[in-house]
Amino acid sequence: MSDFSEELLRPMTGDDLGETRVLSGTGMCFPWLQKQIQSVVTGGKKEKDFAQTTGACLSFIQEALLKHQWQQAAEYMHSYVQILEDSDSFKRQAAPEISLQHALYLLHHGMFDDANRNLSQAETWRYGEKSSSQEVLINLIQAYKGLLQYYTWSKKKMELSQLDEDDYAYNTASQSMLNHSWKTSINLCALIQIPGVWDPFVKSYVDMLEFYGDRDGAREVLTNYAYDEKFPSNPNAHIYLYNFLKREKAPREKLISVLKILYQIVPSHKLMLEFHRLLRKSEKEEHHKLGLEVLFGVLDFAGCTKNITAWKYLANHLRQTLMGNHLDWLQEEWNSRKNWWPGFHFSYFWAKSDWKEDKALACEKALVAGILLGKGYRYFRYISKQDHQVLKKKIKRMKKLVKKCSIVNPGL
C-alpha cells in the first residue's frame, strides 16, 4: 500500500481531531488533504508539496476506478473537487482532468445526461495560459462529448430505419440526425488528428461518414490512422481499414497488403485465416509461400491449438505444397519448429485428449503429424489405430496421404 493510502486509512488521532477537516458528501474525513491545503496558503516550497499531494490524490481516484470501487472513487472525487474550487491556480488548471474522470464514472453507470453536463463544464474551464497538454485534454473532453452525441445519433439512425421514407416524420428525424452528426464531427475530428490510440472515436466518426456517403473521407481517415508514422503501432487501425476496404469490395491485392501488416503485428489474430484464404487465391507463388508461413505462425500460439480450421488449412496446404515440388518452403518453416512442435502439439497425451474431446480435430492434427513426423510418430499412430465406424473412411484416406506425402518418407 502506498504512503498516501496508509495516511488516508490510518485511525484518527487527537492532532487530527483538532484540525479543520475536509468532509465528503457522506462524512468521510480527509485531515491529510486539509493539511496540504493549508500549506499552500503559506507559499514557498509547500506549494510544490501541494502539487505532489494533488497528483497522489488523482492517482488514488484512478486506482479506485480501476478496481471498480465506484462508491469510494466518488467519495474522493467529491472531496477533491471541493478542494479545487476553493484553491488557487494550480488546482484550477487540474480541474478539467478531474471532471473527465467523473464523467467517465457517470458514463459507466449509464448517466449520460449528467456526464454530458460534466463534460460541457470541463470543456469551458479556462484558467491561465493553455499548455499543449491542456489542449490535448480539452480535445479529449470534446471527443467524449462527441461520443455521447454519436450515441444519440445512433439511436436516431435506428428510429429512422423503421420509418417510411415518404413519411413526414422521416424528414424530421433525418434533419435531426444531420444536426447531431455535424456537432459530433466537430468534436471527434480534432482529437483523431493528434497522434494516439483513438479507436472508439475513429469508429464513430467513420460510421457517420459512411452513412452520409463520404466514403473518400472515411477511407482517408482510416488510412491516416493506420499508416501515419506519427501514430503508435495499433493493430485495430489495420483491422478497421481492412473491414472498410472489404465493404468497398477492394481488389484482393489491396486487402492482402493491409492484412500483411496486421500479420507482422499480431500473427495469431483471427483474421489470419482469412488472410491465408486470400493468399491461396492469388496467382503469385510468393503469396502461396506466405500462406504456409501464416498457418504455421497461427498455430505457434497456445490459444490457437484447438482451431480445427487452421489444422484443416495446414493439412491441405502441406499436401499441395509438396505436390507442387516446394519441399524447401516446408523445410524452411519446419526447421525452426521441429524441436518443440512435437511436444507442443503431438504428444501422446494430446493424442488421447484430442480424440476424446474432438475426433474431427484429432484427425486433422494426425494428418499434419504424419506428414511432418512420419507414420510411426505416436500422435499419428494412436489416432490411426482408433476403431470408429463414422470416421473409418477418413482415417483410411489419412493413412494413404501420409504414405504418399510424409517428408520423412525416403521415397520423397
Image (cartoon, helix red, strand yellow):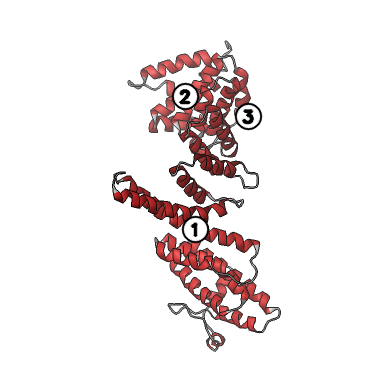
Residue furthest bottom as drawn: 18
Tag shown at residue 377: none
Query: What residue is disc 3 on?
Result: 336
Instruction: Give the residue type at disc 1.
Output: Tyr
Mark 2 touches mark 3? (CB < 8 Å): no
Q: Does 365 sit above or below residue 31?
A: above
Q: Quadrant of residue 354?
A: top left
* Element on which disc 3 rests: loop
Give the amino acid type for the residue marked by disc 3 in the picture. Ser
Q: Is residue 192 above or below residue 358?
A: below
Q: Label 2 vs label 3: CA separation? A: 20 Å
Nearest to the eye among marks 1 and 2: give it.
1
In the image, residue 119 sits, relative to residue 391, either above or below, namely below
Q: Find numbered disc 2 in the image and state the secondary structure of the residue it sits on.
A: helix
Task: State the quadrant of the N terminus.
Answer: bottom right
**10 Å neighbourhood of mark 3: few (<14), some, or many (≥20)?**
few
Contact, mark 1 vs mark 3 (Cβ under 8 Å): no
Q: Which residue is mark 1?
A: 144
**x%, y% of residue 86?**
55, 80
Q: Between residues 311 and 135, which one lies in front from this camera angle?
A: 135
Disc number for residue 366: 2
Q: Is residue 162 visible?
A: yes
Badge 2: few (under 14), some or many (20 or more) residues near its Cα, within 10 Å? many
The amino acid type found where label 2 is placed reads: Ala
Percent position (x, y) of residue 110? 39, 60
Of the 4 image quadrants, the one containing the C terminus is: top right
Quadrant hosting residue 18: bottom right
The kind of secondary structure element at disc 1 is helix
Q: Nearer the viewer, mark 1 or mark 3?
A: 1
Q: Earlier in the sequence, mark 2 or mark 3?
A: 3
